[in-house]
Amino acid sequence: MSETIAERQPQFLDQLCRCIRDKHDTLSTERTYVYWMKWYMRVHGLHHPVDMGENEIRAFLSYLNNDRQIV
């Protein structure tokens, strides 16, 4: 049975936060990483990052550059 993003997202983001804290990064760094990860997941229809790869990263960066003019 496939899990939905609502079931998987908190666990993944918790792991991300733990990893950042283990590296002793600042709270603002943690918040920034979580913000960008949520945006990345939303752009790709709320797919879990484990299910995405290089093509999705390239598409996200292209989206930021071309559509949002951020990069």
Image (cartoon, rainbow, N blue to C red):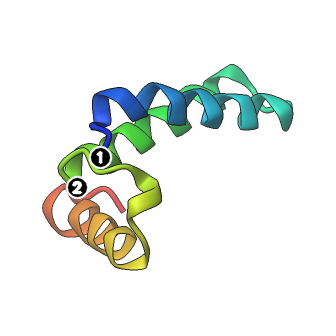
Q: Nearer the viewer, residue 3 or 66?
A: 3
> Where does residue 52 sit, x and y in percent of width and height?
38, 65
> From the image, which quarter does the C terminus lie in?
bottom left
> Where does residue 16 sit, x and y in percent of width and height?
62, 37
Which secondary structure lies at badge 1?
loop
Cα gap from disc 1 to disc 2, whole angstroms? 17 Å
> Where does residue 68 sit, x and y in percent of width and height?
19, 55
User: Which residue is outermost to the left?
Assistant: 67
Q: Which residue is mark 2?
A: 44
User: Which residue is outermost to the front?
Assistant: 1
Which secondary structure lies at badge 2?
loop
Res. 69 mark: none
Residue 62, above or below 2: below
Q: What amino acid is labelled 1 in the image?
A: Ser
> Where does residue 50 sit, x and y in percent of width and height?
47, 57
Residue 56, above or below 37: below
**Side of 63 where 54 appears, left or right:** right
User: Which residue is outermost to the top?
Assistant: 27
Packing grade of label 1 (10 A; few <14, some 14-19, many >=20) is few
**Side of 52 where 17 appears, left or right:** right
Packing grade of label 2 (10 A; few <14, some 14-19, many >=20) is some
Q: Which residue is mark 1?
A: 2
